[in-house]
Amino acid sequence: MEYVYAAMLLHSAGGKIDEASVKKVLTAAGVKTDESKIKAMVVSLEDVDIEEAIKTVAPVAAAPAGVPEGASPEAEAKKEEKSEEEEKKGEEDAASGLASLFG
C-alpha cells in the first residue's frame, strides 16, 4: 500500500512517477523498499490516466466509514441520534442511582 501512496503523492505534487522518485519517497517515509515491487508498480502505471482513475474510484471512497453499502445518510443520522439519546438516558440513570446512595 505504501507504494501506491508514494505514487499518489508524486502525482499530486506534479512529479514524475519513476523508480527513483518512488524509492526516494518511500525511503524518506522510513519504509524498507523492494526494488521489484517498485519496478512492477511503475510499469503498471505507465499507461494509466491517474486523474481518470481517481474520478472513477472517488465516489466509492467518499462513502463515510461505518455506513453499510446502500444505507442512506439519513438512516445513519437517526441511528446516531438514538445512540446519543440512549447514552444520555444511561447517564441519567447512573446519576440517580448514585444520588440514592447519599440520601
Image (cartoon, rainbow, N blue to C red):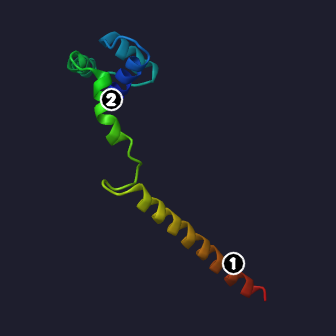
Q: Is residue 37 left or right of residue 78?
A: left
Residue in the picture at 28% in, 19% down: 38
Query: Which residue matches tag 1?
Result: 95
Q: Quadrant of the image for the N terminus? A: top left
Q: What residue type is labelled 1?
A: Ala
Q: Nearer the viewer, residue 2 or 62?
A: 62
Query: Which residue matches tag 2?
Result: 54
- In the displayed structure, 46 sits above or below 84; it is above
Q: Which of 38 and 81 is in front in this view?
A: 81
Q: Which comes sooner in the sequence, label 2 or label 1?
A: 2
Q: Which mark is residue 86?
A: none
Q: Is residue 32 visible from the viewing direction of this image?
A: no
Residue 67 percent coordinates (x, y): 38, 55
Residue 32 percent coordinates (x, y): 37, 24
Local SS, label 2 = helix
Residue 78 percent coordinates (x, y): 47, 64
Q: What residue type is labelled 2?
A: Ile
- In the displayed structure, 78 sits above or below 50; it is below
- Using a 10 Å C-alpha cutoff, classify the residue at mark 2 as few (fewer than 14 neighbours), some (14 to 19) or many (20 or more): few
Q: Is residue 87 visible from the viewing direction of this image?
A: yes
Q: Which of marks 2 and 1 is in front?
A: 2
* Quadrant assignment, res 23: top left
Local SS, label 1 = helix
Q: Nearer the viewer, residue 7 or 70?
A: 70
Q: Are marks 2 and 1 in contact (CB under 8 Å)?
A: no
* Quadrant assignment, res 97: bottom right
- In the displayed structure, 38 sits above or below 95; it is above
Residue in the picture at 40% in, 54% down: 66
Residue 39 percent coordinates (x, y): 24, 16
Q: Name the residue furthest right.
A: 103
